[in-house]
Amino acid sequence: MNRHYFHQDHKELVEDAAGLAEEVTSDFFKLGPSHWRRARYDILTLEALAREEISPHAHALVAKYQGQPHDRSLPSASFDFYRVCLQDHNILKALRSRGDLALFPLLLYIVTHELVHIVRFSQFLALFEASPGQKLAEEQRVHRLTQRILEPFNYLDMPPVIRYYEHHWQGGWQ
């Protein structure tokens, strides 16, 4: 598979988008600073992903792992750890195919969307392991929430990104 990876300037935009995404997601759900210590996550780009974390179609996916502090062996010390797996090749392909999309607002949407998933999983509002029908309904719910969270950011060229995802959902895209 021919893969295109983010360059350093893309990765800097990922960091900026992730910082803003965490802030607006926290504000929307009224999360305190301790929430992200309980719902631990990391964001990786394509070059750092394991084979099973790579998708031929998605812009990102959330992987869930069990973490364990190095100095604790009791099962009660384990915690859920989420990994946002950015799919550089699919994101860059979307940018090439749609001249109205810009990288920063697209990354902001993608990361916010994945953080909404993590919040919902960590608050037991959604199941990580669910049936295909439940996953589809949850995906639609998360897209609606993401759009509500990002409504105030129209000045960041968000409308083309919102239209892009609405178009895919109307066509049954997942």
Image: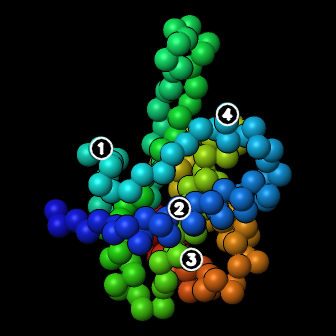
**Amino acid type, mark 4:** Arg
Q: Mark 2–mark 1 contact, CB under 8 Å? A: no
Q: Mark 4 or 2, which is nearer the eye?
A: 2
Q: Does residue 171 sit above or below 65 in this rendering? A: below
- At mark 1, the secondary structure is loop
What residue is shown with label 3?
105
- Which of pointers 2 and 1 lies earlier in the amino acid sequence? 2
Crowd band around label 1 with a 10 angstrom C-alpha radius: few (<14), some (14–19), many (20+): few
Mark 3 or 2, nearer chain start: 2
- Kindly check if marks 4 and 2 are in contact, taking CB atoms under 8 A apart as contact: no
CA gap, disc 2 to disc 1?
A: 21 Å
Amino acid identity at mark 1: Ala
Give the mark, 1 or 4, whose residue is nearer the N terminus: 4
Question: Does residue 82 sit above or below 85 in this rendering?
Answer: above
Is label 1 in contact with label 4 (beta carbons under 8 Å)? no
* Secondary structure of the residue carrying numbered label 4: helix
Asked if labels 3 and 1 touch by Cβ distance under 8 angstroms, the answer is no
Q: Position of residue 86 (x, y in %)?
A: 42, 58
Instruction: Tell which of 91 and 163 is nearer to you.
Output: 91
